[in-house]
Image: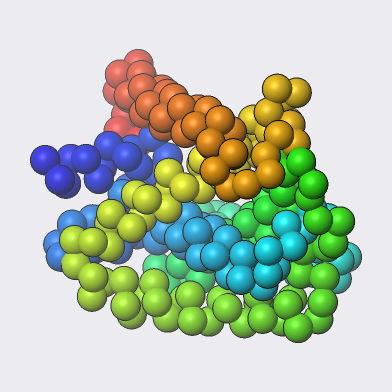
Amino acid sequence: MYEQLLRLVGFGLCHQLPERSFFGAGYQLPVCARDTGIYLGFSIAVIVLLVLDRGRRSSELPPAGVMIVLGLFVAVMGIDGVTSYAGLRETTNEIRLMTGLMAGFAIAALSMPMLNGQVWRRPGRTRLLGTGAAAVGFVLALLPAYALLWWVGPLLGALYPLLVVGSIIFTFVYVNAVIVALLPPFEKTADTVLATWPVFGLALLLTLLELGGSTAFKLWLIRVSGVVL
């Protein structure tokens, strides 16, 4: 039952090839190494950003130099994926994890100021990662994050796949909350974390619909094509 639940969560999101995935206590993680990096990286990055932002609720995107670095993070993952799928070079799960982690960090750094600007009644007018120290600290946080996922994660046993499940849901909910907060009834309505519950509640509902819809769509493709995706 546990293994089936793990597979179901990631079924519509990932190819779930065993040779490209990690395991905890013999259980395959719900998504591949690259996706594991993306989702866990996003979750870790949000925590790091909250610490670095120190409650300012920064609503401005990072400075241009930091944006370039974030763009490179995403580009590196794209290059690794495209060149390996095209047969131009070999990649490994270690590289997939690291490049996915970089992309997850980038997505979080772009999402947080967008959410802050839309959900809070009085968002901070500061730039996220607006100081050199904060930017460097954010980039350097990739190293302990990678160490945690590569070496510590497998030691957690059956808890490791559950952490990935939680990170998948958290990532979808967070990004969906940005979209929900754009709607007039939810825009700039919160003064406290507790007051954000309508935004995140609707975002959770959208997440469940998206995960369920992606699973149903993949099952339909398998049925009509006769090919296991």
Residue placed most toward the observer, 83 or 222: 222
Is residue 144 shown above or below 10?
below
* Residue most extreme to the top: 224
The type of colouring in the image is rainbow
Residue placed most toward the observer, 177 or 90: 177
Is residue 142 shown above or below 42?
below
**Residue 37: x %, y % from top left:** 47, 62
User: Image check: 43 left or right of 73?
Assistant: left
**Residue 16: x %, y % from top left:** 32, 48
For the question of whether residue 72 can be seen, the reply is no
User: Image check: 16 left or right of 214?
Assistant: left
Q: Residue at x 31, y 71 (%)?
A: 153
Q: Residue at x 43, y 44 (%)?
A: 169
How many numbered badges does the structure rendering display?
0
Q: Residue at x 63, y 47 (%)?
A: 192
Quadrant where the C terminus sits is top left
Residue placed most toward the observer, 32 or 57: 57
* Residue 57, image quadrant: bottom right
User: Image check: 69 left or right of 91?
Assistant: right
Q: Residue at x 34, y 49 (%)?
A: 165
**Residue 100: x %, y % from top left:** 52, 62
Quadrant where the N terminus sits is top left
* Residue most extreme to the left: 1
For the question of whether residue 173 can be seen, the reply is yes
**Residue 18: x %, y % from top left:** 26, 55
